[in-house]
Image (cartoon, rainbow, N blue to C red):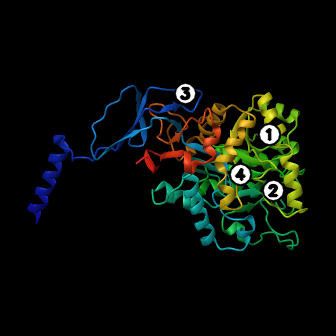
Amino acid sequence: MKKINLIIRMFVAMILFSGFTFAQTPEKQILITNAKIFDGTNKLVEGKDVLIRGNKIVQIAEGIMITQDENSQIIDATGMTLIPGLTDAHWHTMHAHIASMQILVNDIGYLTLAGAEAAEATLMRGFTTVRDVGGPVFGIKKMIDEGRYLGPRIYASGAYITQTSGHGDMRFPTVMTRKDGRELLDGEMMGWTKIADGVPQVIRRVRENLMAGATQIKVMAGGGVASLSDPLDVRQYTLDEMKAAVEVADTWNTYVCVHAYSDVAVRGALAAGVQSIEHGQMITEETAKLIKEHDAWLCLQPLLNDEDAVPFPEGSFEQQKFLQMTAGTEKAYELASKYDLKVAFGSDLQNGAAIAATQGKALAKLKRWYEPWEVLKMATSTNYELFKMCGPRDPYPGENGVIKEGALADLLLVDGNPLENLDLIADPGKNFKVIMKDGKVYKNTLE
């Protein structure tokens, strides 16, 4: 036995010191030819091919040639446009395919499966990355990242951080006051929300989210539409409480984004050092100037009282708030343009699969305020500037949102030219012929 062990050790040593290596399976490569190429910034390139090897774009040039074998694929994209994968900076994976009230009456297993269903549908609409700004999405994200389930890259915030009576406190107003040192609510136990009052509680809850894997922190800074107890005009959290959240996020080298529609909510958040304002539909000119002075982001959504409006009960408190909020959308985009604010695209679509399915249509609505190339830039490279603010918390290192050599291969092949007809992105089932994430093709109707 000793002699056999000696022979094995000698054989291993020979391998290590002789330079001998076992044969490795070549990385799969995909060559896309004859496409117009929108690079994710402001350029439309013609006459060049794009070579993907593994999960990255390795070459963009004229007349690229590859040997065709079992590890190679050539896609002729004549008449089509290659664009980076779309992104959504304000998405709720766990909310997308369910009505809000279902959170209160279903167990976490049902809700997680609904979230997984929503994740797959999101990817198949061409949204290869989302910033998830609230909900217990960590398990779904892990399954996707391990390649065990279909879905986009997810920059996850985890549970909402909210004050008592805040936008993330979904109790009915008739619920009895709870004692100090209270038991957790169902929504807190499932990871939907964390109710924190006072600086010590805020610090603890933010740290818990970071421990769970949050890439950025979501805090409720003002009243919301769907919540039951808070009007839109209120500011939520004191300055010290909001500063505590920002400071803790900073210790982890990441940032805080806040739910805020109104002037008072936005200004309170900016004073505390918040770097990303979610919504902002009700801001005035003076607040737009303040956002510019603080060099903060404004993640706006094209929420309007149109055919895609959320069907709240007629005359309800929620409907009144929805009409109040959407009345400011037009002005908010005008102010963002006037003061050249850093604007990200988010859809915030939820309350059922039919509503979530209009994600591409929501993006196309931005043509009311921007040129098509500006819209596509916002939903690709610009959004990625915001995503990357999480620094070392970034679960997907590498450049993305652009088509350039060395970037990650998240790509869409569009039938036609969305820079001429932006409405093409509103019907991804028909117009997105190829959907690729991380170099892997998830849809190809050209074959």
Which tag is nearer the camera, tag 3 or tag 2?
A: 3
Which tag is nearer the camera, tag 2 or tag 1?
A: 1
- Secondary structure, mark 2, is loop
Q: Which residue is mark 1?
A: 270
Earlier along the polypeptide chain: callout 2 or callout 4? 2
Earlier along the polypeptide chain: callout 3 or callout 1? 3
Q: Position of residue 192 (x, y in %)?
A: 69, 63
Q: Which residue is mark 2?
A: 198
Earlier along the polypeptide chain: callout 3 or callout 2? 3
Q: Does residue 254 lie above or below 176 as drawn? A: above
Q: Give the amino acid type for the residue marked by disc 4 in the picture.
A: Asp
Q: Residues within 10 Å of mark 2 (few under 14, many from 20)?
A: some
Can I make out residue 381 in this image? yes
Q: Position of residue 247 (x, y in %)?
A: 71, 44
Q: Which quarter of the picture shows residue 182? A: bottom right
- Secondary structure, mark 4, is loop
Q: Which residue is mark 4?
A: 348
The answer for how far apart the CA atoms under marks 2 and 4 are is 28 Å
Q: Give the amino acid type for the residue marked by disc 3 in the picture.
A: Leu
Q: Residues within 10 Å of mark 1 (few under 14, many from 20)?
A: many
If the image is split into quadrants, where does the N terminus sit?
bottom left
Q: Position of residue 99 (x, y in %)?
A: 72, 65
Earlier along the polypeptide chain: callout 4 or callout 3? 3
The answer for how far apart the CA atoms under marks 3 and 1 are is 37 Å
Q: Give the amino acid type for the residue marked by disc 2 in the picture.
A: Gly
The answer for how far apart the CA atoms under marks 4 and 3 are is 29 Å
In depth, the one of 347 and 64 nearer the eye is 64
Which tag is nearer the camera, tag 2 or tag 4?
A: 4
